[in-house]
Image (cartoon, helix red, strand yellow):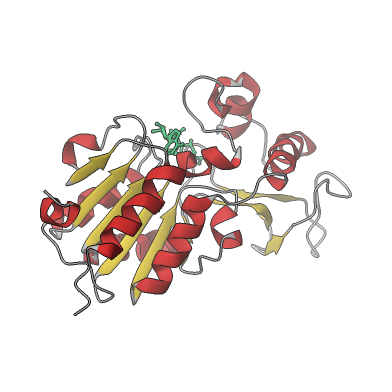
Amino acid sequence: MSILEKLGITVNPKLRAVALTGAGISMESGVPIFRGRGSIWEIPEARRLASRAGPPWNTKETWEFYEWRRKLVSQCKPNVAHYTLAEMEGYFENFWLITQNVDGLHKKAGSKNILELHGNMWKGRCTKCGRVVELLETPLASLPPYCVCDYALRPHVVQFGEPIDRETLSQAFTAARQSELFFVIGTSGVVSPASQMPLLALENRAKVVEINPNPTALTPYMSLSIRGKAAEALPQFWKELLTSVDIS
Ligand code: OAD
């Protein structure tokens, strides 16, 4: 049985398509994931800093942790999975990329319709005047960096227990609710509200395809689960989808 038969859809540019990505898509780029052996939340200091019980987020201490992550990610390049998503955006007339990642690799790969649920490590935010500032260089000249209003910036990244930007969340919910084809790539599916998005898509009778080397909390609900690394399985699956399209 072909993939399209399994999915029961005809792929065409008019399908409303969405991809939800998590840390696993950046694994082949060298960015550590959050859960499991060798992951970020295994570092006690990282957990402490990212939680509400930690220090205020515009301190030198918080920025030192982010500078460590920023330096690491500055040495990483998008991989073929990131580029495939950019290609998919070019194919579908209506495509949204919802990501939990803060590494900025989707933008580097050329994706444009990106909804960054958890913020972006290459930006700082002023908790006094609300300004969001791009901070692309690493190391930063001084820690913490300062806003033009002379107040210390915090990383523009959602921490444990914090709400997600309302506008971004609303756009993501709408995209998920209206989608007809939904990809879930490299996420453990345990962090809400991101984990709700594929379920909303299913309510719209979307076909939901998971790509992950391991089963996840979302696997039981998937229309199709592909066990593989994003950088291998996604380009392969996308090629198969395109070659099975009836172009007559
Ligand atoms: P996790 O670390 O929870 O999950 C990573 C997922 O990637 C797992 O399901 C792995 O099986 C999968 N994976 C590993 N290697 C892969 C590969 N080569 N290709 C594809 N998948 C692979 O990361 P997230 O689900 O992204 O939030 O975590 C969600 C949120 O939890 C993060 O955004 C972060 C964290 O707390 C904040 O920091 C706000």
The quarter of the displayed image where residue 173 is located: bottom left
- Give the answer, above or below, for where 139 lies relative to 116: above
Q: Residue furthest bottom?
A: 248
The tally of labels here is: 0
**Which residue is painted at 15% across and 60% down in the image?**
204
**Which residue is painted at 52% across and 33% down in the image?**
33
In the rendered image, residue 62, in percent from the top left (x then y), is placed at 71, 36
Choose between 155 and 207: the one closer to the eye: 207
Choose between 102 and 86: the one closer to the eye: 86
Viewed as shown, does residue 28 lie left or right of 141?
A: left
- Give the answer, above or below, for where 56 lies relative to 235: above
Quarter of the rendering occupied by the C terminus: bottom left
Viewed as shown, does residue 59 lie left or right of 118?
A: right
The answer to whether residue 193 of the structure is visible from this angle is no
**Which residue is painted at 64% across and 62% down in the image?**
130
Q: Residue furthest right?
A: 141
In the rendered image, residue 28, in percent from the top left (x then y), is placed at 54, 39
In the rendered image, residue 23, in percent from the top left (x then y), is placed at 49, 40
Viewed as shown, does residue 49 lie left or right of 101?
A: right
The quarter of the displayed image where residue 92 is located: bottom left
Viewed as shown, does residue 95 lie left or right of 26?
A: left
Quadrant for ligand 1 reads top left
The answer to whether residue 20 of the structure is visible from this angle is yes
In the rendered image, residue 125, in percent from the top left (x then y), is placed at 66, 56
- Give the answer, above or below, for where 234 lies relative to 177: above
